[in-house]
Amino acid sequence: MARKPEIGEPAPDFTLPGIVLHDGQADRGDYTLSGLRGSPVVLAFYPGDDTAVCTRQLCSYTSELGNFSSIGATVWAISPQDLASHEQFARRHELAFPLLADTGLTVSRQYGITLGGAGLRRSVFVVDGRGMLRWKHVTLIGLTFPSAATITSQLAALTAS
């Protein structure tokens, strides 16, 4: 497994294809982390579309999206499934932020969260507006995830400093 970036280090930059729903329309495009310089980003890596824990996690983040937005933060969710799978998942659960396709696990490897050939560890990274990693939560088993309140408190601490 690759080395995980540490708090205070630059977050590995990447570009991935993604999809987001706007008024029922699926907008596809490329998403580049460095393109968001100036505002914080939450990167939520999840193992799979339409699995029980992943669905709970991403639905809870969608429910609290206003809290993320009020702090000026963007949320991106990243998993190994392709855009067609992401679109079905987003439609089924009305997910309101981009779902990015890391089909080759390239970005997951950069963040040090792959599990050999078995996918990735459920992980959340908070990146500040300068592109520095400021907080992370990497699970061992992946049955838990940080709440939106936990993440927004980390984001609030960034804006207070």
Image (tube, helix red, strand yellow):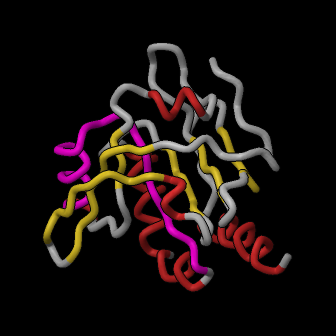
The extreme left residue here reads 25
120, 43: nearer the viewer: 43
Position of residue 4 measured from the top left corner of the image (x, y, whole percent): 70, 31
Depth check, front residue: 152 or 126: 126
Q: Which residues are magenta?
A: 72-91
Residue 141's x, y, as percent? 60, 31
Q: Residue at x 58, y 64 (%)?
A: 37
Q: Residue furthest toward the right?
A: 161
**Residue 134: % across, % down:** 76, 56
Q: Residue furthest top?
A: 117
80 drawn magenta: yes
Q: Residue at x 45, y 18 (%)?
A: 118
User: Image check: 101 left or right of 105?
Assistant: left
Quadrant for the N terminus, please: top right
The foreground one among 77 and 6 is 6
Please tell me which residue is depicted at 63% across the width and 28% down the height of the picture.
112
- Residue drawn at x 51%, y 53% is 33
Q: Is residue 23 left or right of residue 50?
A: left
Does residue 121 appear to the left or right of 78 in the view shown? Answer: right
Number of labels in the image equals 0
Quarter of the image containing the C terminus? bottom right
Q: Residue 106, relative to residue 49: is it above or below?
A: above
Residue 132, given in percent of the width and then of the height, sits at 72, 54
Please, is residue 84 above or below residue 38 in the view?
Answer: above
Magenta run includes residue 140: no
Residue 12: which quarter of the image? top right
Seen in the picture, residue 113 relative to 66 is either above or below; the reply is above
